[in-house]
Amino acid sequence: MNIEQVKKDIRLEKTALGIELGSTRIKAVLIGSDHAPIASGSHDWENRLENGIWTYRLEDAWAGIQDCYRKLCEKVEKTYGEKLTGLAAIGFSGMMHGYLPFDREGNLLTPFRTWRNTMTEEAANQLTQLFGFNIPQRWSIAHLQQAILNQEEHVSKIDHLTTLAGYIHWKLTGVKALGVGEASGMFPIGDDGDYNQEMLDKFDALHAAKGFPWKVRELLPKVLTAGEDAGCLTEEGALLLDPTGTLKPGIPLCPPEGDAGTGMTATNAVAVRTGNVSAGTSIFSMVVLEHQLSKVYPEIDIVTTPTGKPVAMVHCNNCTSDINAWAEMLIGFAKRIGVSCTMPQALDAIFFAALDGKEDCGGVRTVNYFSGEPVTGLAEGRPLLVRDPDAGFSFENLSRAHLYGAVATLKIGMDILTEQEKVSIDTLMGHGGFFKAEGVGQKLMAGALSTPVSVMETAGEGGPWGIALLAAYRVWAENSETLEDYLANRVFAGSKSTTVLPQKEDQAGFADYMVGFHKALEVEKAAVRYFPNN
């Protein structure tokens, strides 16, 4: 789109805004009437480990949202000479799952318990048995159940539960609702696209004698599918987003979605037999199913697309954090010898060196667990490096081991889908920081998963662009136009992507690496046991 058309879109309020609260960055993306990004703004933030619980402070969320929106507005004015005063639509997304319980006055009853916590094993196992449906530890209902088991005082005071995206949406619109994909990470979704009524009844029956002043459905946000009315920006909400008072209220919002749903949207992976891998602080794959799996697997979550189609999700808590830590160490080493090195330079060095490492990493193994990993049954993590005494301990082999370690746990869950359940995947789209070094993460992941991996030229925009697209779909779709058709025909019709096929030598090398990785997990368990996390 040329600059004059962008200016016209801004003046006529034919732009859509998406803001996503990721694990390390809050980012805003503004798109024009052709769905292409025209401006962005970002704000870095980090989770905190407080009293043994991974959390974010809600005041930090608001500070980050306001900062990235301010930066976006400044870029719009600097680039196009126009002030952003109105929008066609807005969407918010965030890290899925977790626990945000509020009382009737809107007070948060506990610090935000994020997806990263592995403190609900007892509850998750109990609910999985009760429902006959896998309930992962990070799901909101597992956190509620664990709080009940722990006899936490706040439980009887809960008025409603929500997720991070749901909280932001509620404060901006007054509407307590979630997109169905995000809701499916709070509580299982039934065939009708709403919370599974049979499971709701089982949960209430389990606690009937406790005398709680609520039924579980009363606590959960309303479920909406993509395109449905999710409310409008209130006057108070407009000031929360833009304290300068420049942004007008009354703007429609789409249903808030989780980062899984926005990743599917941003990679056009919402139709059956499509899938995507999001690889950043955490790593997860999403495969849209033609039919339900034959049985319950603790390694696989069943969630939904933003339109309610069943999705098999393999979610791993750990991906690039250990790579980033090693990059920081290398920056420190470079400083010691008088060499200037930035974080992007250090990361590029690791990623591109990995291509020159031996296919099996030469006897070097890493376990990248900063936090617990439910897929492999670990409640805590200890980043680990193990090598044979005669290993080829080179920078290249170590770098390749770090990249292999980042996808090793995902491989365990994906093998269940492709080998045991015979799930067919036509396309697997990659996005996230793991794919920033051109061709590297893509090549190694294709070999690891024995599946072609594609990366779109828009992959760098990621989830914030995905939620902007969902906001656009909310106001620009025709009456009978499905999200699948809207994305295929209006957004991605002319998009370019690169596809890398798995190479036999990479597949064989990764298979050898996995033999050692499974052994290293036993060392990891011992490390957790003998080196407590004080």
Image: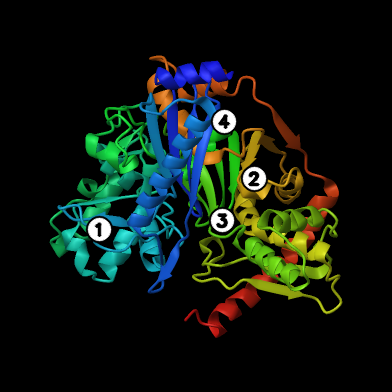
Which residue type carries mark 4? Answer: Asn
96 to 2, vertically: above or below: below
224 to 504, vertically: above or below: above
Q: Earlier in the sequence, mark 1 or mark 4?
A: 1
The location of residue 214, given as percent across then percent down, is: 16, 53
The location of residue 496, given as percent across then percent down, is: 68, 27
Left or right of residue 472: residue 159: left
Q: Which mark is residue 281?
A: 3
Residue at 38% x, 68% y is 122
Q: Could you say whether the residue bearing mark 1 is in a helix, strand or loop? A: loop
Q: Earlier in the sequence, mark 2 or mark 1?
A: 1
211 to 524, vertically: above or below: above
Residue at 53% x, 37% y is 264
Q: How far apart, in angstroms, are the residues tagged by discs 2 and 1?
A: 42 Å
Q: Which residue is mark 4?
A: 268
Which tag is nearer the camera, tag 2 or tag 1? 1
Q: Which mark is residue 108?
A: 1
Residue at 53% x, 64% y is 373
Which residue type carries mark 3? Answer: Thr
Residues at discs 3 and 2 in contact (Cβ within 8 Å): no
Q: Residues within 10 Å of mark 4 (few under 14, many from 20)?
A: many
Which residue type carries mark 2? Answer: Thr
Left or right of residue 399: residue 532: left
Q: Could you tell me which quadrant the N terminus lies in?
A: top right
Q: Which residue is mark 2?
A: 418
214 to 390, vertically: above or below: above
Q: Which mark is residue 451?
A: none
